[in-house]
């Protein structure tokens, strides 16, 4: 009887996790990016799991979307293959997600934090 351990698969250095494998470290990166945002700095958004990725949810203090001032969906970041991510904004009128960008997570987080076209922070 052999007590040898089964071989473990190791990722290549710098290789992306498999699509759909959402890491807590990514959530922390998103949280840090939200601290640098340019709009609605007086509210504290939270990061929540959503499907294969992370969703940014925030209180709707302006009450433009939710007259009661409840939480609303702001953005959804979904990992793809080979270090690629997809960034969606929430279209509250149509009640759906709309693709706003794809690429490396750091670039998409800059886009989300700056939001020059007010696609996310409405």
Image (cartoon, rainbow, N blue to C red):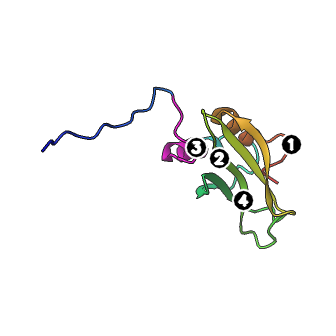
| Foreground disc of the pair 1, 2 | 2
Q: Which mark is residue 78?
A: 2
**Residue at image location 81% in from the left, 71% down from the top:** 67
| Residue at (45% x, 27% y) in the render | 12
> How many marks do you count on the picture?
4
Which stretch is magenta? 15-32
Q: Are marks 3 and 1 in contact (CB under 8 Å)?
A: no
Is residue 37 visible in the rendered image? The answer is no
- Within 10 Å of disc 1 (Cα), the crowding (few <14, some 14-19, many 20+) is few
Horizontal and vertical percent position of residue 13: 46, 26
Point out the tag, 4 or 2, that comes first from the N-terminus. 4
Where residue 32 sits, quadrant-wise, is: top right
- Residue that carries the numbered disc 3 in the rendered image: 19
Which residue was labeled with disc 1?
A: 117
Q: Are marks 4 and 1 in contact (CB under 8 Å)?
A: no
Which of disc 2 and disc 1 is earlier in sequence? 2
Decide: few, some or many residues near mark 2? Use Cα within 10 Å; few <14, some 14-19, many ≥20: many
The numbered mark, 4 or 1, whose residue comes first in the sequence reads 4
Task: Report the quarter where the N terminus lies.
Answer: top left
């Amino acid at each position: 009887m052999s007590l040898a351990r089964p071989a473990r698969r190791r990722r290549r250095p710098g290789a992306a996790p498999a699509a759909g494998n959402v890491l807590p470290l990514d959530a922390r990166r998103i949280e840090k990016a939200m601290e640098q945002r340019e709009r609605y700095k007086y509210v504290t958004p939270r990061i929540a799991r959503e499907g294969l990725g992370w969703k940014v949810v925030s209180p709707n203090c302006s009450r433009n979307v939710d007259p009661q001032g409840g939480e609303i969906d702001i953005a959804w970041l979904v990992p793809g293959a080979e270090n690629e991510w997809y960034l969606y904004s929430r279209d509250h009128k149509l009640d759906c997600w709309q693709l706003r960008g794809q690429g490396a997570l750091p670039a998409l987080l800059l886009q989300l934090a700056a939001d020059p076209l007010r696609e996310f922070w409405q």
